[in-house]
Amino acid sequence: MITRADFEAIATWIPAGSRVLDLGCGDGSLLAYLKATRNVEGYGIENDGASIVRCIQTGVNVIQMNIESGMKEIADQSFDIVILSQTLQAMKRTESVVADMLRVGREAIVTFPNFGYWRHRVQIALGGHMPVSNDLPYQWFDTPNVHLCTIADFEAFCRDRKYRLLGRMVFNHEREQTVLPNLLGTLALYRLTRDRVA
Amino acid sequence: MIASPLKMHFAEPLQLASGDVLSEYSLAFETYGTLNAHKTNAVLICHALNASHHVAGVYENQAKSEGWWDNMVGPGKPVDTDHLFVIGVNNLGSCFGSTGPLSTNPATGKPYGASFPMVTVEDWVDSHVRLLDQLGIRRLAAVMGGSLGGMQAMCMSYRYPDRVRHAIVIAAAPNLSAQNIAFNEVARQAIMTDPDFYGGNFEAKNTVPKNGLMVARMIGHITYISDDQMETKFGRGLSKSSKDSIVPPAESPANLKFSSEPEFQIESYLRYQGEKFSRYYDANTYLRVTKALDYFDPAAEHGGDLAKAFTPATAKFLVISFTTDWRFSPARSREIVKALLDDKKEVTYAEIDAPHGHDAFLLDNALYHRTVRAYFEHVVIGGEVNL
């Protein structure tokens, strides 16, 4: 569930006037918010026709495209920031999607529900069931979330691929969580870039 | 909505891309809705291969005379004439009212026929802009078209950047593929090899290359429909007249015989469509319009870089394609989108899931119409304070 607090947190990493691409932009509300508060220009990428109509109604430029297709229509380094908001866990080709984000943009912002949150751990460890919560409301058999990860997993993922983390924010619902984030955080936000090869 | 055809005569010569000059000409057009005081709510609709200026509404006392995009344009329709002033214009070289091969050449007093000059997409756009000048429309709220009409919309966006606020490009392509040109060439050969063609001067012989036109239309028609749609609509079904005469061979091989009569439904359908077309369409027009399609290639003069062709454009773009369109496939629309993204233009792109193939742009499709409606309501009309 994306909240106003998530928008505000993301916006703190967006310099005014940036060129932004929002992958899986849904109804375009994040981009509309960033246009209003950060004067950004850019496009949403979405593959659902009804969402595209909503984007048009919101006044957001939107391109219909499968973000796992390689996004060949988008030139290298043509955006300042590429956002993937709470969509990472639903990607089949997670690695190439993150690589493409850093191909088309100088920086990427990735947000995802933290599977390491203690309630999730308890549900598996003691309950013996796949976690179901407000943040992960799906049953195992009908979830769109095929690649859930923890904060520790994502940081290892970035380290292995030499992605440089420029910022991290972890929230427990609407409050920022600084102590034991992987245990107590429900939502993780990362800002990353690709180190230039000399 | 009652439509009435209008005509505007232009005495000032039109320089054509070919080098020829059209000394004078007329454009047939229709308008729907009311032009506002600031003249900021005008939408120009460009037509494709065989359509005309009769976009919407019906003619007085003529039932079933709906315009070719009547499901899209009209009061309360996606392009809503309660708010917009919509103009349909017939392209030069056509056979539906604007000056073309059937018109009288003022220099000779006889019909142009085969001597009518080659007109290109650029020439059409130039002539459309002159019509806008006459109507006092400085800047269109939108130029819109499907297929070849989409090419005109694109062309106007970069050829006359200050005349277009929005360009709506539907089921189009940045140029024709070899396969597209091949289909056009087969159609042209069908016409030109018809014994009644007489090098294009069939008028003098009091005839028309009816069979050639018919075959040309049959070939075109195949490319407008998807394989699946043809299968759904016709399959291997037999036409009514042949049901009695032939029995499917698998059931009774003894009944198998050669017949030149249409047996399968798809054969009867194509013959019917071709026959109908040959009664109202001019062969010289068909040859020229397909050539205009073949020649359209805005990237060519920019070393193949389509983004450079679009550089002057200031319009916002809505690009729409249809998943089963194999004539101008979504991949071709994505080339247009890529060029616009490279140019950092404002663009929205929708790929509509529709089974009908290229023809989908003319048909009712809820999501397609919702997309166009949303764009007009919120971007074209909503985006302009004094519209």
Image (cartoon, grey):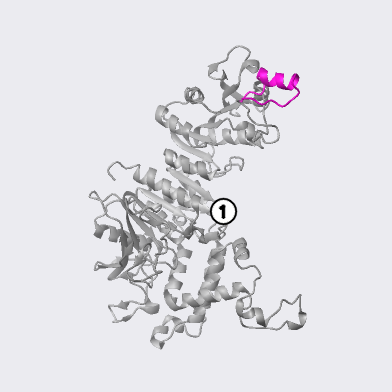
Q: Residue furthest top?
A: A179
| Image x and y of residue B68, in percent | 42, 64
Q: Residue furthest left?
A: B37
Q: Which quadrant, please, contains the N terminus of chain B?
A: bottom left
Amino acid carrying label 1: it is Thr
Which residue does the image show at 41% across and 61% down from the upper left? B70
- Magenta part of the chain: A113-133
Magenta stretch: residue A114 in it? Answer: yes
- Residue name at image x 68 percent, y 83 percent: B258
Q: Residues within 10 Å of mark 1 (few under 14, many from 20)?
A: many
Q: Nearer the viewer, residue A148 or A23?
A: A148
Nearest to the observer: residue B232 or residue B44: B232
The answer to which quarter of the image holds residue A171 is top right
Does the stretch in magenta take in B94?
Answer: no
Residue A146 rendering spot, x and y as whole percentages: 68, 34
Q: Does B345 appear above or below B271?
A: above
Instruction: Choose between B224 and B242: the one closer to the eye.
Output: B242
Disc 1 sits on a residue from what chain?
B
- Which residue, given by chain and number where applicable, does mark 1 sit on? B323
Q: At which x and y percent is residue B256?
A: 73, 81
What residue appears at the point 57 percent right and 42 percent down from the top-left corner?
A: A71
